[in-house]
Structures are given as structure tokens and as C-alpha cells.
Amino acid sequence: MSNFVGVNDVLGRELGSLRLSLTARCNLACPYCQPDGQEPKALLDQAQRLALITASCLLGAQTLRLTGGEPLLCDDLEPLLAAVQRRRSQKTNPLSNLHELALTSNGVLLTAARARSLRQAGLDRITISLDGTDGASVAQMSGLRGGSVAGIKVLDRVLDAIQAARQAGFDPERGDLKLNSVIQRGLNEHQLLPLAALARQQGIELRFIEYMDVGNSNGWKPEAVVTAAEMVQQIEDCWPLEFIGRLPGSTAQSWRYRDGGGLVGVVASISQPFCGDCNRLRITADGTAFTCLFGAQGTSLLPWLVPEPNLDGLIQIMQSLWQQRFDRYSEERLKAESVGMVPTLVEKPAMAYLGG
Ligand code: SAM
Ligand code: SF4
């Protein structure tokens, strides 16, 4: 087994976190995300995923977030978690470096049994995405045909999923259970306070995410972004807040409700980019590495995964990829916009492929 190497990029940023996408497919069709509904041809198997996780841990990753598309559509999710957990508990295994094993899901398939099996398999944290508290908003934000009736069905399943996760041992007070909401101007702005109220009532930290220009097909426009500052102001007008801060390498700024209502966060990727300490490596369901969420070009790791994983080769290529990394797309976009420049249109992969 190779030794721990750790790696810094051109801007001195360490590799700290792996976001591994297990599928590009989704059971919802959120218009801001635009899943293409098809699995890539070269979907990775367990051995390939484990090799990528091992190489990332040897290069410094301390957190692993499994994502998609919708990761609960992946049949071998629990076996993967169990395999990771086994390795994590072995002192000399590179995966013992993993402090956090997390998953992001839309919650629709998170039944009580599934929540228990994920917990038993070793999952530490789960983030559930929900963009509305009424049927019409959920239908619109999830791309459901069937209007508010369909939206209410999804909403009820997600509310049940939150309950199921809590009962399975994902304790929101410890941060094991969180909520994500994307807010888009003109679509679900009016859901900001109801979503905050729902999370407060449930004692769960909710992170409001600025609508991002990932991919080319979601029709993103700067005007559709409700900025983190606006969101915080609206919440603050209702429930006074105290700023806590943003941990290095984290995406969310945290705030505390002064009335004891817990925490709320904002992910200000557009208006206050945090490229300066971004430590995330993303690998898609077909083994393509992206060193920036807004990156146009990925690097296929398949030559080091097929016909079977070559761990030393993977470490070398991933190390060299990270060492050459100088992405700071979001900061550059902001700078360009501030001097009136329009970003050039390049072909960019969609969020459901990149994993968010
Ligand atoms: N299907 C899962 C889910 O929805 O949680 C996991 C994958 S999804 C791509 C991960 C996260 O990215 C979700 O919280 C989703 O809301 C967020 N997301 C997707 N497209 C986005 C966009 N254009 N801007 C901001 N957040 C986005
Ligand atoms: Fe699916 Fe998640 Fe994308 Fe919505 S955000 S379409 S739930 S992958």
C-alpha cells in the first residue's frame, strides 16, 4: 500500500474532500440542475470507486460525500458504505483518514428501512434537499409534471424522510442531518421564510444555496440569483441572527438564531465566492475528475481504472492533476462582472453529472 502523500495546488490549497458521484440519473428533474436521465456508459463499479476513495485519502481527503444524480438510486450504495466503513476502522488503512462519510439526497427514496440501512452501513451524515413547503413550489422546483398534487406527494415523502433519518440516528443537533434549499428569484423566493420556519421547527440546520451557473442548460441569469445577503436580511427581519462564520474549506456561512432556534446557513458561491480555500475534488459516476464545480474540462481517470484499478497510477495522476490546479472560476466571474465583462460561453457539464 502506498504511503500518505498529501498534496497542494498552485494556489496552496490542500486536497481535503472528495465528492464522488454514484449515478448521473435522478428521480426528479429540478430545472436548475437538469439531470439528463441517462447513466454514463462507463459507470464505475465498487472496486473502481474504492480505489478512487483510497487514492483521494492518501492525497489528503478527510471527508467523503456521496452524491449524484440521486445516490439512493444506486443499488450498491450500502455495500459501498460498508466497505468504506470497514477500511475506515483499520488503523493502518488510508481510509482511517476519513473523518466524515456523508451523502446528499433529495430524500424521495429515503424510507425508514433505507435510513436504518444507511446508518448501519456507516453513513455519518445526510443532507436532504428541499426547495419548498407547498405542493406547487415543490412541483415547480423539482420539475414535476402534475402540479401541486404531485408536489404534495413528493413533499410528504421528503418530510417522512427527514423523520426517518432522525429515527435512524442521524441527529440534527450533532449536524448529522441537514437540509439544503436552492432559492431562485421569481420561482421560490416566497418559500425562504416558510422553509426556514420548517427547519427551525424541526431543529435542523438548513443551508440556503444561491442559484449557480453550473452547466449550460438551466438558463442561468445573474438576475435569478437571490444573494446570500438578501436571504440573511429576510431571515434576520423575522428572527434576529448572530453571525458565526465559515469554517475553512466549508461552503456555508453559519448564523445562529438569537432566540435559540438553532443554526441556519447560506452558500454564497455566486455573490461571495470561497475559491480561496476550496479543497474539493469531484469525481463523476464514470470516473472523470473535476477540480472545480464550474470547470468545463474534466480528466478521465478510466485509463487507471480499466481493466482494473491501478492504485499507484491513480495516485500519480490525481496528485499531478491537483498540483496543476489553479481554478477559481467563481471569483473570476465576480471580478469580470464587476468591470462589466460578460463571461464567454463554454460547454460546461451539468450539476447532476458533477454531483453538486
Ligand atoms: N439529488 C441529490 C439532491 O438533490 O440532494 C444530490 C445531487 S444534487 C446535484 C446536490 C445539490 O446540488 C442539491 O442540494 C441541489 O439542490 C444542488 N444544486 C443542483 N443544481 C444547482 C444549481 N444550479 N445551483 C445551486 N445548487 C444546485
Ligand atoms: Fe435530481 Fe438532485 Fe438534480 Fe434535483 S438537484 S434534479 S434531485 S440531482
Image (cartoon, rainbow, N blue to C red):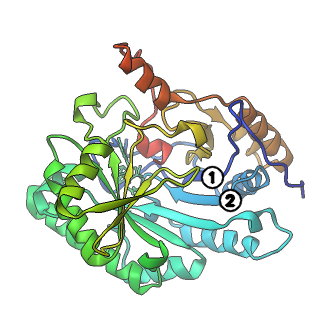
Identify the amino acid type marked 1: Ser
The answer to whether 289 is drawn above or below residue 25 in the figure is: above
The residue carrying pointer 1 sits among few (fewer than 14), some (14 to 19) or many (20 or more) residues within 10 Å by Cα, namely many
Identify the amino acid type marked 2: Gln
Q: Provide the secondary structure element on which disc 1 rests.
A: strand
Return the disc, 2 or 1, that comes first in the chain's sequence: 1
Q: Provide the secondary structure element on which disc 2 rests.
A: loop
The residue lying toward the viewer, choosing from 250 and 235, is 235
Q: Is residue 33 left or right of residue 322?
A: left
Q: Judge whether residue 188 can be spotted in this image.
A: no
Image location (x, y in percent) of residue 93: 82, 67
The residue carrying pointer 2 sits among few (fewer than 14), some (14 to 19) or many (20 or more) residues within 10 Å by Cα, namely many
Image mark for residue 317: none
The answer to whether 16 is drawn above or below residue 119 in the figure is: above
Pointer 1 residue: 17
Q: Is residue 43 left or right of residue 311?
A: left
Screen quadrant of the N terminus? bottom right
Labelled pair 2, 1 in contact (Cβ < 8 Å): yes
Pointer 2 residue: 62
Q: CA distance from mark 2 to mark 1?
A: 6 Å
How many marks overall? 2
The residue lying toward the viewer, choosing from 300 and 127, is 127
Quadrant in the rendering for residue 184: top left
Image location (x, y in percent) of residue 157: 26, 72
Q: Residue at x 42, y 45 (%)?
A: 352
Q: Is mark 2 within 8 Å of ligand 1?
A: no
Q: Residue at x 27, y 37 (%)?
A: 225
The answer to whether 73 is drawn above or below residue 30 in the figure is: below
Image location (x, y in percent) of residue 304: 76, 41
Image location (x, y in percent) of residue 68: 47, 53
